[in-house]
Image: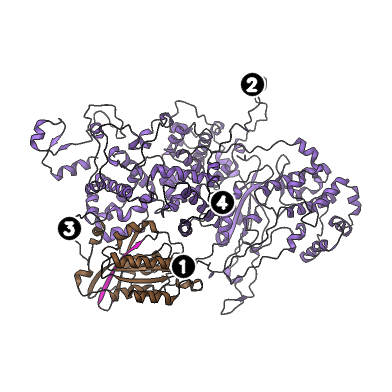
Amino acid sequence: MTMLGKAEYGVTTFFTRSHPNDKCGANGLPLTPNSVKVLGRFQGLKHLKHPQICKYLDIVKDKHERMVIVCEHYRNCLSSKSSTFSSREKLTEIAYGVLKGLAYLNSIGITHRNLSKDNILFDAEGQVKLAEYGLYYMTGYGAEVAFPIGMPQYLAPEVLAEAPITVDEHSDVEPEVLNPSGPKVDVWSLGMILLEMMCAQDLWTGLTMPQIFHKIFAFLKTDQSPLQSIAKDNSLTETLKTLTPDVVEFLNKCLTVSVKHRPSPSELLKDDIFTELRLKEVPYRNGFQLFSTESRCKDLELPVYGENGTIMQDFDFDHLSLRNMEEVYYLWRLAGGDLEALLRKEGLVITKPPITLLPSFCTNEGDVFGQRRDRAELLDSIVITASQEQLRNRLSEVDEKAYYPLLEDEQSSMTSSLPLSPSSSDLTNTASLPLVIKEKDVEYQFHRIILYERLLKAYPYKRAHIWKEARVDIPPLVRAPVWAALLEVEGDIEGLYNSIDKDTITPTDRQIEVDIPRCHQYHELLSSPTAHVKFKRVLKAWVVSHPEYVYWQGLDSLCAPFLALNFTNEALAYACLTAFIPKYLHKIFLKDNSQVIQEYLAVFSHLIAFHDPELGNHLDGIGFIPDLYAIPWFLTMYAHVFPLHKIVHLWDTLLLGNSSFPLCIGVAILQQFRDRLLSFGFNECILLFSDMPEIDIQRCVQDSIKIFCSTPKSATYRQHARPPKKAQKEESRPNLSYYSRDYNDQPSTDLSMEPIPIEELKREKVPRISAEDLIELGELTGPAHSKSPTKRKQNSKPMLLVVDVRTDSDWLKQHHVTTCKSSYKPEWFAGVQKSW
Amino acid sequence: MANRAGAQRPNGATQGKICQFKLVLLGESAVGKSSLVLRFVKGQFHEYQESTIGAAFLTQTVCLDDTTVKFEIWDTAGQERYHSLAPMYYRGAQAAIVVYDITNQDTFGRAKTWVKELQRQASPNIVIALAGNKSDLSNKRMVEYEEAQAYAEENSLLFMETSAKTAMNVNDIFLAIAKKLPKNEGGGAAQPRQQGMKINNSETSQASEGGCCK
């Protein structure tokens, strides 16, 4: 966790290079916009964590390929404080800090390539913080933007010697940087920057860019060391003499023309000049990460108590600054933080009338001339700081204690964990509002996020508590880890995922490759090339490690929500998918799944008849059977038929239910279109669902819970459902076991359900229920201990009407007092169903 | 009403006879089956057309002289695994379009297997059309026009190269099928409503009222 501390949010913006409109890739599809490529690559940057780098927080794709980037920011930078940093000690400290940051970035394959005095920042403690280090990486080494990256005067000679990126507008081949710059270019830049700092003067200030390039190229032609040449050129020879030999030596190492002989950042860190600093260094603690096997107390620091029990540490009363930087940013946006408005206010979004950008001459072939270059395409290095004022005002009323909610209070029930809020009357009121409103409420989200964050830290110990809270809602910010917790993901997921062979070519590859570029591609992140690579790896990993199953089209859709949520944590996405499938799709991905699917669909049509006999009869009558429309529903748990923003809300609830819950969702969907379906014939019905119509997902979720609670458990019995889990600890999910447990997980007795042959099952119109449920629902044993969710008060009406359809003689022989005798009149049933 | 198809077609006038035909699209996945249907029915093209799971159903009406031909189109999933479902869609179909991708030789091979299967197992009078889709990508062509045409002639199939993206030959192939379908014996062609039932393996005997001209 990176604490906010005294950091501010810096906002920068640039344009990606846009493709000509009519260009297509080799597959006939339009080229992926560069902005989307940048978007995908950026995600990896968000998770970089090191004390010497500023944390990237967010990227937003705006109109016309404009990218807006939010990053941790400090107002102090090297260029603003030149004179105060000229002492040798201070400068070696800075150099050491920069090199540590660079070495970390290099270790994950990132080259800064853009180092300058403007992006070496200092935090409140004076620690070096590198900024803008991701620009070169995220833009595909500069290929996806129309501006050059890097300050000319700090560029290493080999960067200039490289062939420029040529963009052929008329070929469909993407420009690629063949030789992206390596880590050593940054060492040269650092050398130049240090030299400027030592001499307290900027070099080559009066020169034009070609002149600067000429100077740099000149180093290649002479035997003299660049340091000497520069000194001579700028009459700095005297200044250099004042420097100690080890400093001159160090500068010479940095400013080595030959890349081969120039040290890399990690090599330079071992330089003698840093001996003292190395000794003083405190090892960097990365902090605890969820879902890893690392001991979570490894880096734990306990507060030091003084003699009279007071905490010796300086206690920071700015509680918000102790919160996670990303979390505060999330709340900042909820509190009205608007990036575009900010840019506009600072004059960074200058909209020109499009007509002024038209070319003056255009040929029939589409070549254009005389088009003035829009200055907006260039990089504007201005960083705007976003004020946290608004958010802090919103949260100023929040009690200090709210930052540290107690979890161990035995009395606390579900909603009482929401503390009273002084500004609005009560947060529990908010808890009952529609989800869309709750998700936009700053204070509500603030409390929920803090609570979940604490609970997740205590996962799996606090699993039961997480379940309980998840029944209220799941804040979008913590959805990924909460889902993983609900799916009971545990153990060394990283190690497991890394051990799976995701590279060897398999016969399934072609299918996966054609499916991915069509799966939820309206989602910007999932349409990026980065996503496609990850997508393929996760799917291949699943197929390879589940030899009993095969890849069915639809598995891609199923994977999409997990990948979108855990974009930078493939292992967790994989772990969630792997936990989800046996829970809800047991045996569905068998090579021959016809029995499993047939049974599933038969039970589904029974449920329709059970809950809505009129609709059931109608649909059955026109031949609108689930086989024709519901296969994509169940095969993908609705991930193929809904957009992602709806799926997440549906699954928030789905994950709390058992394996029969999806059936209830299906019934709820049909009921939402009940009137239309009843008036429709076969063709209209099937057309309605061939393109899933707009659906009120919130209502659908509510309805399916109602349907689920009023379905006798045995009515959803499926012989192909997952067999009972072995020895599950009961206490892990107290009071919830009924909802989340499957029928098969209940102890089976003589009165339990027996498998029915599929043909028979399909012939039947309504569900069977077990003798247990009959006794239970009819209260045939008296007001016994009810274990069904359809619990009722003692004096309410019976929930079940039993009609005895045996022959008269059988009935006379023996019958239960509460049952009715009938010679089977269908009207009976109409009444029974209504009473549900 | 849900019959969006009819509304958009300029030639959807209702005069003379009305015939209804069941048409099924078959072929390897990602060759453009759903795109062809979407182009024909709604006149649209989605670059990132989602994969089809199970099957999708759409209808479209075309006019031929004095006959109105209504296609009930079953667009099937292309993945080999869904093969076991296919018979339930092509059973009782009067027409089929077998689609391949001209930039991929394997899909042409798969199309041939589909043709064989239809000849063996579908209704004997089924009209089969072969569509070489993605003809806008002819610079990436892997299946020669002549090769496919020769194959089509051998097997007496209708054949066209189509492009769902540019709309080339899309309406034409459906029209060609409509022309070739027998429209005289009202009963044979007009098999309304029952389509849904036919798919059901169990021989349920619900009366299927409704008729074709609703």
Q: Amino acid at mark 1?
A: Asn
Check residue A338 in the rendering and tell me which mark sits there, or answer none. Answer: 4
Measured Cα–Cα span from mark 1 to mark 3: 46 Å
Q: Which mark is residue B104?
A: 1
Res. B55 image quadrant:
bottom left
The residue located at (48%, 73%) in the rendering is B138
Q: Which residue is mark 3?
A: B207
Quarter in which the N terminus of chain A is drawn: top right
Question: Which residue range is magenta in the image?
Answer: B63-78
Letter of the chain shown brown in the rendering: B
**Color of chain A here?**
purple
Residue B66: within the magenta? yes
| Mark 4 residue type | Asp
Q: Chain of mark 4?
A: A
Q: Is residue A51 left or right of residue A512?
A: right
Q: x, y (%) of residue A269?
A: 76, 44
Disc 3 packing (10 Å; few <14; some 14–19; many ≥20)? few
Q: Quadrant of residue B203?
A: bottom left
